[in-house]
Image (cartoon, grey):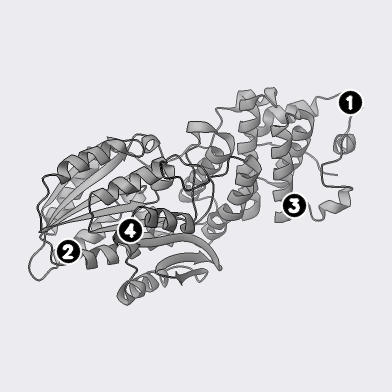
Amino acid sequence: MMQFTESLPPQVSSFSSLMMNKDSSTNNNQIQRARPWPGFHTSKNLGNIGDTNCMEQLLVHCANAIESNDATLAQQILWVLNNIAPPDGDSNQRLTCGFLRALILRAAKIGTCKLLTANLNHSMETHKFSIIELASFVDLTPWHRFGFTAANTSILEAVEGYSIIHIVDFSLTHCMQIPTLIDAVSSRVEGPPLVKLTVAGATEDLPPMLDLSYEELGAKLVNFARSRNVMMEFRVIPSSSSDGFSNVIEQLRVQNLIRPDNGEALVINCHMMLHYIPEETRVISNSFRAMFLKAIRNLDPTIVVLVDEDADFTSNNLVCRLRSAFNYLWIPYDTVDTFLPRGSKQRQWYEADICWKIENLIAQEGIQRLERLEPKSQWVQRMRNANFRSSGFSEEGVTEVKNMLDEHAAGWGLKRDEEDLVLTWKGHNVVFATAWVPL
């Protein structure tokens, strides 16, 4: 018979108090048999209750109970999950704990378990990184480095011979990709080009978060470029993903009217940012994402690089989203054991950012639900609909990516999918990289 742990996680304290304060005649066995769980005819069907598949099933049944406003069943399952998924357990337990927290937040928000409302403000705090911390953080894993490396090789090939390179950066990682690009162009035989960097400054707080302003970040990048004898112009345009970065698009459109006929390359770099543009499950011609890509196409860019996580979090159905997320987000929890020790601050920061994702896609709805990943196949179709064609990656670019992966754990892999590149972990798709030019 399972017992409550001596010290329960704060996020389930209200629920725990509710269960422990029941009439003394109600013991744990009675709680468990008060109502059979849907789909489980007997307790034997649960098998190993700590098994990953069982944890997923429990989360699914809990989500269904919350959505059907069955507080009693929801609380029973939450109680079980709390006992089998400690926040400091193995990777699958920590993953399940993240979903447990998110389901409690959702239950409290919609009123299924009103006694949990007091815990709405108890959310894992995301860390604000310094520039040095974020650079070190990004280097720990190929999760972002894969996209940086693949994108930079394509960009450098596309802008060869141009005296001015205008990079428009829609990036989640605060320009961490740019210094390597500056280093590369600084060694040009004919001399370095002028680099114009326009950054879409997202008005939403999205992890990883930085502890300095975009203006301060720009000053550091300009100084770095100067140290490499590269002239750089930096501009940040505050803009929101909620309207498809319309402010950036409009300013680029106006600027494009006076763009030189030749000599200036326009690079659109999209790194794990476009999935925050609102979207549902189908490719719709007048959706924000479609309009964004068509507006980019009208700028006649030299190259567009699109890198993102290869998963589908767009469903309006909570259970579908939960299953999709559970079967994707095990990967960052599994990989962290290869590069960060238990108890380290960096590991806490890393997992807090994953928990932010889980809470957003499970506990939030409507415009508050920002995490809306789409798989590579969907983005490929969108790009083609916007009149782009794939430019692919050269053998030299693929070699660069492979050399980068050699610096990391053996579980990471690379596969080519038609003209695109896909980062894998133990054979599972993680991140895709695509490169495009106008038709």
For marks 3 and 1, the one nearer the N-term is 1
Residue 54's disc number = 3
Label 4: how many Cα within 10 Å (few below 14, some 14–19, many 20+): many
Location of mark 4 (residue)? 388
User: Looking at the picture, how far across and down is residue 78, in whole percent?
Assistant: 72, 37
For marks 2 and 3, the one nearer the N-term is 3
Location of mark 1 (residue)? 24
- Contact between marks 4 and 3 (CB within 8 A): the answer is no
Q: CA distance from mark 4 to mark 1?
A: 68 Å
Residue 185's disc number = 2
Q: Residue at x 49, y 32 (%)?
A: 368
Q: Amino acid at mark 2?
A: Val
Name which quarter of the figure residue 8 lies in. Answer: top right
Q: Is residue 421 visible?
A: yes
Label 1: how many Cα within 10 Å (few below 14, some 14–19, many 20+): few
Label 3: how many Cα within 10 Å (few below 14, some 14–19, many 20+): some
Q: CA distance from mark 4 to mark 3?
A: 44 Å
* Left or right of 280, for residue 273: left
Q: Nearer the viewer, mark 4 or mark 3?
A: 4
* Left or right of 239, for residue 368: right
Question: Disc 4 on helix, strand or loop?
Answer: strand
Q: Nearer the viewer, mark 2 or mark 4?
A: 4
Q: CA distance from mark 1 to mark 2?
A: 73 Å
Q: Amino acid at mark 4?
A: Phe
Q: Quadrant of the N terminus?
A: top right
Count numbered badges in the picture.
4
Q: Residue at x 82, y 41 (%)?
A: 37
| Front-most of residues 362 and 282 | 282
Question: Disc 3 on helix, strand or loop?
Answer: helix
User: Looking at the picture, how far across and down is residue 286, in whole percent?
Assistant: 40, 41
